[in-house]
Amino acid sequence: MKTEYLNFYNNLIKLTTNKSLYLGVKSSQDSFSDRMILFLLHFAFILKEFKNKENDKKLQELYDFNFRQLELTIREIGYGDQSINKKMKDYINVFHGIISEIHFWDELDITKKKEKLSTFLENFDDIEYLVKYFDDFQEHLSKNNLNSYIKSVSNQ
C-alpha cells in the first residue's frame, strides 16, 4: 500500500466528514449512503480536474486504491460477501454516473447544477449550498496539482 494513496484517501474522508456539508440533510441523521455519495462526488471532481495524459496512470491507481478501501469499509460495517459485491457494483455505477453528470460542470448554470446534484443527493434540502461548495472545491483543485494534493493533508 502506498502511503501517498492512503493520504489521498484520508483527504477524501476528511472532506466528506466536513459537518457543514450535512446541514441540509432532510432527516435528523445523515446516512452511510449520504457520506458515500459525497465521497464519490469529491473523488469525481478530483478526477475531472486532474485528468490528463500525464496523470492517467496515477489516477487509475488512485481509483483502484479508493475502491479497495471502500470495499474494506463496507466489510467492516458488517455486510456479507454477496451484499458487498452488490453494494460495490452499485457504488461504482453511481460513481460513473456522477462523472458523466459533472463532465460539463463549468458550462452549467446554477439550476442545472442543482438538478445534477439532486439526482444523487435525494436526502438533502440545501442543494444550492452544495453547488457553491463544489464550485469552490473545483476552484481550489484548479490552483493545485495532483501530486501536491496526494502528498499533503488537505486544507479545504
Image (cartoon, rainbow, N blue to C red):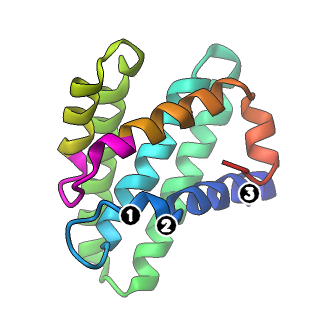
Q: Earlier in the sequence, mark 1 or mark 3?
A: 3
Residue 18 as seen in the image, left or right of residue 156: left
Separation of marks 1 and 2 at Cα, in angstroms: 6 Å
* Circle 1 residues within 10 Å: few <14, some 14–19, many ≥20: many
Q: Which residue in the protein does label 1 denote?
A: 22
Q: Who is closer to the viewer here, 2 or 23? A: 23
Q: Which residue in the protein does label 2 denote?
A: 19
What amino acid is found at the position of numbered circle 2 in the picture? Lys
Q: Which mark is residue 7?
A: 3
Say which quadrant the N terminus sits in. Answer: bottom right
Residue 69 as seen in the image, left or right of residue 82: right
Residue 85 as seen in the image, left or right of residue 7: left
State which mark lies toward you, 1 or 3.
1
Separation of marks 1 and 3 at Cα, in angstroms: 23 Å
Over which residues does the magenta segment extend? 120-130
State the residue at coordinates (48%, 74%): 73
Decide: marks 1, 2 in contact (CB < 8 A)?
yes
What amino acid is found at the position of numbered circle 3 in the picture? Asn
